Amino acid sequence: MPDGQFMNLHRLAPEVVLCLFGMIVMAVDPFVGAARKRTLGWLALVGAVLALASVHVANHFPGPAYSDLIHADSFSMFLHVVILSAVVMAIFGSLDYLDQENIQRSEYYALVLFAAAGMGILAGANELVTAFVGLEISSIATYVLVGFRRRSPVSNEASLKYFLLGSFATAFFLYGIAMVYGVTGTTRIEDVQVALNEAVTSGGHVPALAILGLGLILVGLGFKVVVSPFQIYAPDVYEGAPTPVTALLASGPKVATFAIMIRIFYVSFSAAQGYWFWAVCVCAVLTMLIGNLGALMQTNVKRMLAYSSIAHAGYILVAFAASTALGVAAVLFYLAAYVFMKVGAFVIITHLGQQDEKRLLIQDYSGLASKQPVVAACFSLFLLSLLGLPATGGFVGKFFAFQAALGVSRRALVLLVVIAAINTIIGAYYYLRVIITMYFQAPHRDYAPTPVPAAVAIALVIAAAGTLYLGILPSRVWDLAQTAAGSLFPH
Amino acid sequence: MGTQGYLLTVITFLPLFSVGAVLLLRSDDQIWIRRIALAASLAEFAVSLLLLRGFDSANPEYQFVERHAWIGESIQYHLGVDGISLFLVLLTTFLTPIAILCSWESIHENVKGFFVALLLIETAMIGVFVSLDLFLFFVFWELTLIPMYFMIGMWGHDRRIYAAVKFILYTMFGSILMLVAIVWLYGKAGTFDFPDILALMQSGQLVFPPTTELLMFGAFFLAFAIKVPLFPLHTWLPDAHTEAPTAGSVILAGVMLKLGTYGILRFCLPLFPEAAHRMAQPIAVLAIIGIVYGALVATVQTDLKRLVAYTSVSHLGFVVLGIFAFNTVAIQGAIFQMLSHGVSTGALFLGVGMLYDRRHTFEIKQYGGLATPMPVLMSFFLFISLSSLALPPLNGFVGEFLILIGTFQTHHAWASWASSGAVLSAIYLLWAYQRVALGEVTVEKNKTLPDASTRERIILATVAVAILFLGIASPLFTRRMEVSVNNVLEQTSGSRNASRPVVAPTAPGVAATIPHRALPAVAELQVRP
């Protein structure tokens, strides 16, 4: 083979760039004065953008890398773009936040880049232990990031909580992998599929131990994508984390974990579809209900958005439950749309929170529209997209999800879609409540708006443009999502 | 096609482009914001009149059709009008400049946002009427909500937030289930294209089992019935109408309610003919309850704007009744009633709004004897009230008469019950007029109220001319609807036997027609009493 190791590097180009820049940021740190640490943020940004560009390189050399541990297929590439877009927006949103909180440090950016690399590996992993490594890389980086406001007890509490429960969840995942290995004698995604199919043809059913393993994997991954009943930690952690980190947390790991979930459930465990279908359906219903009802009660915007991201995981599971290539495409499109609107919303909260994140109550936003009309309009756009109104990415995502689920003639799925539809209405109430506060109520007298810094403005422009583009001209991305989904099913 | 190729796109998106122009202005430049919005909406009306010139009333097909791929292969940008949607588009473009003109002085805060919202609503509403792709239709359908929500919530009266939330939650609840039904329909038909789906159904390639059809019909109908609003789903309406600013009420009552009845006629009937026939009886009963209940509740209102709001429940009941009578005359009447209600009730809200601008109250008690200080305004008010209570030869009469005549042919009882609504409308409107305008001036402040200004006279005169024109020249409208209405009826009869023969007498100024297919021998028959 003429390509060998060199080709492997090409296929892993985004991760290589991310890690390289992560290390450069750390190495350069001692030479940068305390007042100019912000420069490191720009350096990290360059790294993230270059990584985004290098997806193009990886895309040119599709195929397996490192003895088939990693797959550089269009599925992985699509998710790389989504994850890295989230990372870029999150870094833009962090620059001024860190200044304002007085925690402008190189570690922050390095950890963000390393976390992104972990998510990238997770998106491309074609082997369970590799997936575990990717999951751990991204998790450990985010544990630290969540506690990055060291002087804030809330942030510390969140970090500890996330770390303890997160380790527990990854242990479940690892245990599941062990069981799957015990049954099939392999950890490669496709080999597991072949082994299970053989077991079904010879034994008539999927071995019970494999189902148990799948159940444990579902617990571990369900924790990371924040699916009920494994969601308990999420509101506290999302609320306690520095807001730009929450933006990253709510987008990146969710996207990456859904990627490996799709590979494991759709490919490895395609023989066990009859089992996991019901588990996914139950999780979807619980997730939507708990997310939306929880959000309904909140007075804190950050916490409300945390619950809303739980609810969105539920909508994604509706498409996931479809168990078809169309379902995978719908999940991918939804993730893309979700990342732009969610990160956009969190970036706005970051900006409006002001120092020490003290303005986070819905009431703090009253009359915002008259003081900062553009910010209010952007926030409304993201909220309406999260709610799923037409001309936004959120709507088209939900639409494709419904379409995928209803494309399979199954009564349970029709019911699931109807439940999702009713949940949308519950969602309407709390999203619109924020808009009411911003537009229909009188402004606070003592509120002095801080002008929008350039970096935040860029993040918002990217997020708003993405949301509108996916809402009005979704054709191209939808085609890509379908190609990406197709690459999982070679036949 | 030629130059007309993009006419519908231009009509649909012209207001959106003028939104761009308005956004470029400084927000304190109120005069130019108003002027540009008005100019844009007038231009829009002028352009929309071109539709009349190119419209072929003998052609049962959709006209001015535009069709382009949009998302993948299954979702298209597919526009077209027929005799049903044509006049609803014109109604929208006619009422928008009036709504802009009537908010000329009453809107002071955030003027820019207000006119942006108004123009956005116009684009969305026209989009609903001209969309022939179910996905596109749904997009426009939902897009009407948000600007109206802002309009009620930001520029409304005291309880505006409550009304805005109620309005949007109610309507979204209906429409999200319709979305599920639309997507489900796609799963069966493989396309979102409305004419294609109908063609599939007619060729027998797409057949729904009765229960499924009923569920789908229910999902669509619920969305439309909430919008209409059909009793007992009407409770959002009095709040939204009363709390909205005048322009909002005009647009809400004038056009937005018709999105519901239009949707029933355009989609519910042809897509689910069997279910529509099965459900006709209960729906008609609800419509009749709405007619009578709306009228009775309107009678006892002490709030003038709420009174006018309840008249919509009553009048739209007629429209729904006419649609579910399943004959040409009644459906023509229903469409005509949509137009005439749009103009008359819009005009009533204009009049109420003008009173509010002077006294800042809707309490009927606060008025009385207003004909003395403001003879011009009150004369117009009387004229509008008479049109709304269906006095011949004004517009209201034509619609109600056609509906009752048409319904009577198929269902004597329905028509008899519904006609009580016509009597009640005379009671509540004339009584309200009496309390507001006639007698001595009871409140000291009212003695010095100024009469209609030039701007108000222009508005009221335009509306009055429209009322008279609709009433006298009704054949100009009904003739253009006829072929399309027959087309819908044919699709709705589906596998059923040909619809029952209908003999339609004609009133003065009313051109009633008979389904050609049903009675070929007497197709040209015109009975004169």
Image: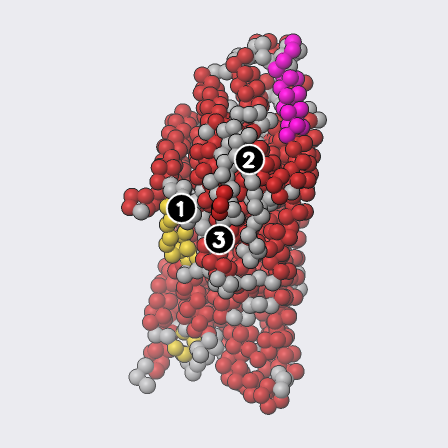
Q: Main secondary structure of the magenta part?
A: helix
Instruction: Tell which circle, 3 or 2, labels the residue nearer the N-terminal end.
Output: 3
Give the residue pinned by disc 2: B505
Q: Are marks 2 and 1 on the same chain?
A: yes
| Quarter of the image that includes the N terminus of chain A | bottom left
Check residue A390 in the rendering and tell me which mark sits there, or answer none: none
> What's the amino acid at mark 2?
Pro
Chain to which the residue tagged by mark 3 belongs: B
Q: Secondary structure at mark 1?
A: loop
Instruction: Look at the image and tell me whether residue B447 can be seen.
Output: yes
**Coordinates of residue B87 in the picture (x, y in percent):** 45, 37
Horizontally, residue A446 falls left or right of residue A22, namely: right
**Coordinates of residue B381 in the picture (x, y in percent):** 56, 20
Q: Is residue B368 magenta?
A: no
Horizontally, residue B464 falls left or right of residue A161, namely: left
Q: Nearer the viewer, residue B317 or B103?
A: B317
Q: Nearer the viewer, mark 1 or mark 3?
A: 1
Query: Image height check: is B306 above or below A90?
Result: above
> What is the magenta range?
B422-440
Identify the colour scheme used. Answer: secondary structure
Q: Secondary structure at mark 3?
A: helix
Give the residue pinned by disc 3: B134
Instruction: Look at the image and tell me whether residue A154 can be seen.
Output: no
Q: Nearer the viewer, mark 3 or mark 2?
A: 2
Query: Which residue shows up at 60% across the image and 55% down it?
Result: B274
Query: Image height check: is A2 above or below A408?
Result: below
The image quarter in which residue A185 lies: bottom right
Q: CA distance from mark 3 to mark 2?
A: 37 Å
Give the residue pinned by disc 1: B59
Chain to which the residue tagged by mark 1 belongs: B
**Coordinates of residue A318 in the picture (x, y in percent):** 58, 63
